[in-house]
Image (tube, rainbow, N blue to C red):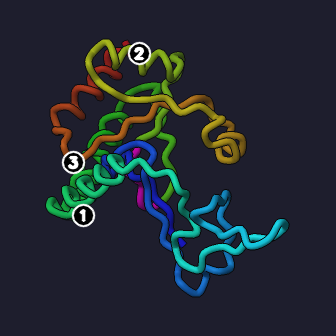
């Protein structure tokens, strides 16, 4: 089984996504919610789920969002998934390299192959303050509170994190601007 959001790195509309379930697993999984589209009400106390993937869908659909998701998929495929991944790896790698040189900045990403989401903390400055300073400079980044990743944050005793997510449309100069901004904050 694989589920993915349509927004974020695919850049589709919020509220869209994909679900893939291998056919032999399909009937073993109950959807989190059902309505008259995903199941048939066959008796007062019984319903029967559809036997196809639409058991995970509901009657109401935002067709414009679905169309937007299709456009986002077509756009990504036209650029090429490998090209997008390579560009995101390059930019996030440059960002990590730059941030690692700054005093008081700690990269919080784990794993042998980090994603393009760069999470870090900055001694003496709350994540929200770093995000606000970036916003004033015209740089969009975010903060991730421990409640967003409860198990990991508690196990690692993490405070709120600064999150930067360079994407293929960003430039190396924009990544350098973010590093420079954080460097200025360390002074």
Instruction: Report which residue position mark 3 lands on.
Output: 168
- In the rendered image, residue 107, in percent from the top left (x then y), is placed at 46, 39
Residue at 19%, 56% in the rendered image: 75
Magenta segment, principal secondary structure?
A: loop
Residue at 16%, 38% in the rendered image: 171
Instruction: Report which residue position mark 1 lands on.
Output: 81
Q: Write down the region rendered in magenta.
A: 112-117
Check if mark 3's residue and mark 1's residue have beta carbons within 8 Å: no
The mark that comes first in sequence, 2 or 3, is 2
- Is residue 116 shown in magenta? yes
Observer-nearest residue: 30 or 60?
Answer: 60
Q: Label for residue 19?
A: none
Q: Residues within 10 Å of mark 3 (few under 14, many from 20)?
A: some
Task: Tell me: residue 128, above or below residue 13.
Answer: above
Q: CA distance from mark 3 to mark 1?
A: 11 Å
Q: CA distance from mark 2 to mark 1?
A: 32 Å
The mark that comes first in sequence, 3 or 1, is 1
Check if mark 2's residue and mark 1's residue have beta carbons within 8 Å: no
Image quarter of the C terminus:
top left
Instruction: Report which residue position mark 2 lands on.
Output: 132
- Is residue 169 shown in magenta? no
Decide if residue 10 is on the left or right side of residue 36: left
- In the rendered image, residue 130, in percent from the top left (x then y), is placed at 43, 19
Q: Which picture quadrant has residue 138?
A: top left
- In the rendered image, residue 136, in percent from the top left (x then y), is placed at 31, 12
- In the rendered image, residue 57, in percent from the top left (x then y), is placed at 53, 61
Q: Which residue, as the protein is rendered here, is positioned at the far front?
A: 43
Name the element at disc 1. Answer: helix
Q: Which residue, as the protein is rendered here, is positioned at the far bottom?
A: 24
The mark that comes first in sequence, 2 or 1, is 1
């Amino acid at each position: 089984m694989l589920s993915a959001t349509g927004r974020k790195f695919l850049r589709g509309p919020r509220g869209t996504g994909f679900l893939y379930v291998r056919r032999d697993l399909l009937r073993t999984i109950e959807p989190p919610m059902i309505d008259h589209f995903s199941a048939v009400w066959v008796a007062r106390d019984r319903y029967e789920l559809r036997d196809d993937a639409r058991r995970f869908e509901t009657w109401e659909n935002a067709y414009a969002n679905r169309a937007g998701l299709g456009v986002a998929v077509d756009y990504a495929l036209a650029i090429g998934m490998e090209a997008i991944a390579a560009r995101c790896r390059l930019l996030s790698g440059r960002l990590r390299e730059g941030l690692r040189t700054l005093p008081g900045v700690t990269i919080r990403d784990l794993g042998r192959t980090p994603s393009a989401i760069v999470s870090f903390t900055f001694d003496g400055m709350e994540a929200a303050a770093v995000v606000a300073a970036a916003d004033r400079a015209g740089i969009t980044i975010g903060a991730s509170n421990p409640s967003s990743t409860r198990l990991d944050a508690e196990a690692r005793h993490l405070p709120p994190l600064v999150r930067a997510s360079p994407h293929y449309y960003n430039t190396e100069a924009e990544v350098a601007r973010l590093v420079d901004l954080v460097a200025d904050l360390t002074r």
